[in-house]
Every structure is written in structure tokens, then in C-alpha cells.
Amino acid sequence: MKRKVMLQLVVPLLSLCVLFLLLAMEPEQSRKGTELVEVSVVLRQEDTTLWSTARQGMEQAAADLGAELRLLTLESAGSAEEQADFLQREVAGGAGAVVLVPADTDVLGDVVKDLSTQVPVVTMETDMELWGACAFVGMDNVALGNALGQAALNGALRGKTVLLIDSVGGRGGVQERLEAAASVLEAAGRTVRVCRAENGESLREAVAAAVEREAPALVLAFEAGALETAASVLEQMEGPAPLLYGSGATNTIAYALEQGWITAIAAQNEFAAGYLAVEAAVEASRKVPRTEVEPMEFSIVRKENMYDPANQKLLFPVTR
């Protein structure tokens, strides 16, 4: 009787031990699929402030998918040459995939074409799939420029001047937005002027000087950094300031929209963009089949509708 009781206790215990060992010993193929992937993220700014929400999405994707992020910022904002050096160094150093926010496709095209044969390259803001990038995560830049141009028609009457801020300079998504908006505005009888930082001046100085010189009815910025800068300049103006429209969804921009310093913005879910970029990079590195990444949706958001449920998700994404 005693022996029978012992067998009833020991046999199930041994079965549980065997089951535990089988679960712990993953097949070789499964272990390979979950190896840590090193993903280098090359931004085009000197810091990650403007990409803080997207960075949260990247970090969440890294935690979910088993990746290690290495975020790289520039010493000189918008330097495509510095980005090219970073890309070559990271790939040579063993990066498993790269996420890039290109500053200038003219400079980076050949570099991306070469490196994409060695590791997957995913771009944000600017589509470089023609140069071999495996995916693009971002909005349709021409559609975005058209939408901002159409929205701006409500704030600038025919014959009035609209100042467009070219804050990046090189060829890329921001330039595509600017050109699309300019076409819409000019076709509708608005006078278009373009503002660029030149001769060593800061973007803030360039915007302040252009606003004083051109006396525009409206200012248009096409990425978050330029929109924040323009809002800061116009907020401190004496007398009536021009209306401000732009693209971006940082906390600073949301606050300026709420205060009325910005009239309208084109916003996307930055958290989702960051997540999708790292997800695409990791899956490409592991050669996981996936469907094509669709352009990110965006909405034109004003103070009056910024707290609508759908727009809240764009301006204040819930992170996990």
C-alpha cells in the first residue's frame, strides 16, 4: 500500500519534470528566430527630443520582438554626410538592421544602395525603397503637402503671401511636402515665399527675418522641429502674428495648438510609426515574410477638434 502511494506521487512528479525540460529545450530553429537583433537608428537631429514619442514606440517594439536599439544623433543637424558615415560604421560594426531618417537622398542614395545588400534598411519620413531600402514607414508626403496647402487656403486670401519653411534643405520627404503645398497655393493665386537658414544663421533667425521681411498672412512648416521653432518666433512677435500651420505631433506642438499659437497641424501616430519601423527592421533581419508597409494615416487637427477621440490618439498616444 505504501509503495503504491509513493508511485502515485513520484510518477506525476517525474512527468512534470520531463515536460518542463521539453518546454525549456526549444528547437534549434526557434532559438535562431529569437536571437537578439541589433538595430541602429540614425536620426537627422542633434538629440532625440522631437522623436521622443516615436522612440517610445521603437523601444516597445524592441522589447516585444527581442531587439537591441542603438540611437544615433548628429553633431550637425541635417548633415547627410555625417549620416552616411554613421551608416557605414554601424554596418561594419555588426548592426543587424538600420532605421534611418534621411537628410538628403542625393547624398545617401548610393550609400543606402550599397549597405542594403548587407543589412535591411528601413527609412522614416523619406521613402528610399528605390535605393534598396526594404521598407518605408511614414505618411504619403505628396498627399500631406496637398492637404496642408488646401488647409492653408482658408487662412490666406487670394493674393496674400504664404511663407514656407524649408528646414531640412536636402532632397527628401520634407521637400516633397513643401513642393506639393507650394503647387496648391500658387495654383489658387497665393504668393509663395520660401525661407531657409543660410550663411550660418539659425533656423529661428531665418524665420524671424523672413516674417519681418515678407509680412506673410500665413506660415507653413513641414516637420516638427520647424513647426516648434516657428511657433516660438510668432508667439513673441509684437502685434498681430501670421497664422501658423504645419506637420508634427510633439507635446510642445500640442500645447501650442491648444493655446492658439498654431492654427492647424497634420498629425500621425508617432508611437505607431516608431514601432512599425523597428518591427519591419527586425522582421527583415530575421527574414520573416511580411506584407508591404502601408503609408501612415494622418489627420488635419485644429484646436476645435484636437480632443476628439481619434485625434487624441494621434496627439497623445497611449503607450504600454
Image (cartoon, rainbow, N blue to C red):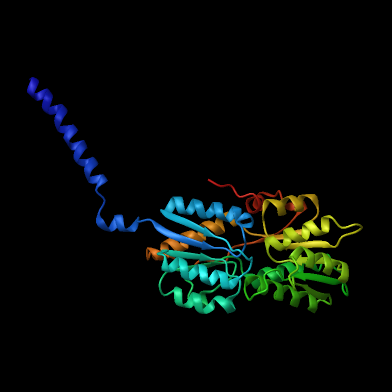
| Residue 89 image position (x, y, % from top left) | 46, 68
Viewer-nearest residue: 95 or 140: 95
Viewer-nearest residue: 213 or 46: 46
Q: How many marks on residues?
A: 0
From where the camera sits, is residue 263 visible? no
Quarter residue 159 falls in = bottom right
| Residue 211 image position (x, y, % from top left) | 84, 67
From where the camera sits, is residue 36 visible? yes
Report the residue at 50% width, 52% height from top. 59
Q: Is residue 130 above or below residue 221?
A: below
Compared across the picture, whether 133 is left or right of 241 comes to left
Quarter residue 120 falls in = bottom left
Viewer-nearest residue: 70 or 65: 70
Q: Is residue 165 above or below residue 234?
A: below
Looking at the rendered image, the quarter that the N terminus falls into is top left
| Residue 37 image position (x, y, % from top left) | 40, 59
